[in-house]
Image (cartoon, rainbow, N blue to C red):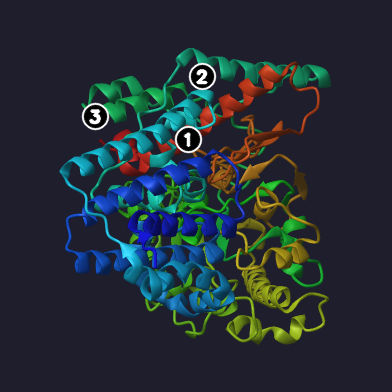
Amino acid sequence: MKKINQIGILVGSFIYMEILLRIFTNEKFFNLGLMYLLLFSVAVSMALLTILSFFKPTTCRVTMGIVIVFISFVFISQLVYYDIFDTFYTIYTAGKAFHAMEFFMDAVFNALKNIHWILFMLLPSVTYFLFSSKRMKLINWNWLQRIVVMIIIFILAGTASVGIKIESHKGSLPNGELMLSGHPVVLVNHFGLMITMGSDFSRTVFGVESSLEPPVLNEKTIKRAAELEELRDEKQYNDLDIAIPKFELNKLDIDFEQLSLGTDDEIIKNMNDYFKLVKPSSKNDYTGMFEGYNLIMITAESFTGYAVDKEITPTLYQLTHEGFNFTNFYNPLWGVSTSDGEYVAMMGLIPKIGVWSMYHSGSNYVPYAMGNMLKARGYKTMAFHNHTYTYYERHISHPNMGYEYKGLGNGLDVTPTWPESDIEMMELSIDDYIGHEPFHTYYMTVSGHMRYSFSGNYIALKNKDLVQNLPYSDAVKAYYATQIELDRALKYLMERLEQAGIAERTLIVLSADHYPYALEKEEFNELAGFETDDSFDVYHSGLIVYAKGMKPETVDKPISSLDILPTVMNLMGLEFDSRLLMGRDAFSDAKPLVIFANKSFITDIGKYNYLTQEFEVIKENEFKSEEEENDYVLSILEEIERKFYYSTMILDKDYYRHIFIE
């Protein structure tokens, strides 16, 4: 019987699994990424075979089998992880796997749900041990052949690298360094899983950090963009025949040039140069609207605006429609789901890819965290979480943000169900602060957590009778049951504020950590009431900014969770420098920009899908030519690149300490 070539077995196995994963993720299949995937798969396979060529035949067969089984396990685990979280895990996240053991049953459930995909992924391993290893024709390369193979590997990798460079010059890969800085889903779609994880491994294990050069700071270009913004504003006001309002800037007196003289760090100097050029936003008619108010901020687990219903979730409905009603609010999903969702809303920065940014900020100086901002102004500041207090290392990050922090196991004695009750958290925590004005309280809820079923979710089962007659599938009913728990917790909170006579001077701000990605696509569409797209609609969410007695107002401007912090600081009349945050005050003159993890974006002019490189213009007659439209898209992509880069550097360099302390 004819023997199977060893090269064909390994190359075929790798390409087979890459193609399967590509089909499973439903990302764009036919693009240049498919070519890079094939080139890199062959290059990696040949590199492994070169190493195996030094082994004895028996050792070679066993080692190759171990490699195929291990790679199969990696692909299967990434497939299950993607099915749960809509992204791929990094080496750093895998190193924190002990945290995820609490959600072991969710992983088992999703694995069973995708058992057919897992069996397909196991085919190379099963085939190898049953047939291929016995019929495998071992390679027997000499040194000359090994050198030739290495040359072929360099040619394959070089061809892919040249293609990437050509793309970067066309502007389709801003900064030309997607390999080292991109979103995991984008990277896997563009290079394949093995190369993506290999790059991540070298960065995480060996400390080979991104070699990204700082984005080019063309002072004339940045200033010209600001001038064009002002011209657009002027034209808008002239069309309305009203005068342009003049306000002070949300800007501090920071001498960036003097700060640069005090450091030898070239990156810090570059950061000083950049923030000096950023146009600060203006104060406005809403500045100080809630000055001196108590502040309660809530990150609601898996909440979405689609869950706001007058009959099912009446308190959420009341707060949404009797406060600021943000009809165009987006809550992007970031790499570390809940923790990154908290980080964006609480820090006003884009999280660093590949790490737990909130945890890493735990040793930094973070003056713009609301706990620190308000504690310095005499507020009692507390934070609560009704799940394990150490989860995502919140016991490190939250005290650093200025909070007295309590969670399950650390002073908040909620009943340890899965998930735990939001109402119980409110009942146990509110007396800790309600009599200590002014106060600022932060809640991270957990009742809305997946899975959405009546058999694996205590909260869903608890509220089952309240959703039994709803015209939805069981999963959507179970999801609504978890949101009812949040709704009732808010009702209890409002009643206690009323009883204390402080509802009229307490501002409530609520947003989600991420959308309910555990719902299947058809279930999410059922919840939303229409056929949603995966690029933008699923991230459309709800933001509550409410105080009793305020005049209800609708805000149609596109904003995101990145804008929450500067918006709240401006509403409370706090002094801050808008240049040092990546979000924008929703009521300011700053042009709206919603940034997604894969660098797609939404502005007041249009929507850009980074993966398909398609721009949908919302405002008609905005551009005089296709060239002008392309220039606009490229300018926004360049701005996004800067925001990603400088957000990372603020975290890595502890930049606020350099600005405000050193």
Front in this rendered view, residue 508 or 378 = 508
Residue 159: image location, x then y, percent: 40, 32
The residue shown at (25%, 53%) is 205
Q: Judge whether residue 214 can be spotted in this image.
A: yes
Residue 16, given in percent of the width and then of the height, sits at: 49, 58
Measured in 3D between alpha carbons, the distance from the residue under mark 3 to the one under mark 1, in whole angstroms, is 20 Å
| Callout 2 secondary element | helix
CB-based contact (under 8 Å), mark 3 and mark 2: no
Residue type, mark 3 in image = Asp
Q: Residue at x 17, y 60 (%)?
A: 55
- The residues tagged by marks 2 and 1 sit, at their Cα atoms, a distance apart of 13 Å
Instruction: Name the quarter where the N terminus is drawn.
Output: bottom left
Q: Quadrant of residue 102?
A: bottom left
N-terminal-most mark, 2 or 1:
2
Local SS, label 1: helix
Please name the amino acid that badge 1 sits on. Answer: Lys
| Residue labelled with disc 3 | 265
Q: Give the residue type at disc 2.
A: Ile
Does residue 354 appear in this view? no
List x then y, in percent, for residue 101.
Answer: 40, 76
**Few, some or many C-alpha atoms within 10 Å of disc 1 (few <14, some 14-19, many ≥20)?**
some
In this view, the residue in front, 363 or 502, is 363
Residue under the image location 75 percent in, 42 percent down? 556
- Report which quarter residue 265 is drawn in: top left
Q: What is the number of the mark on residue 222?
A: 2
How many numbered circles does the render carry?
3
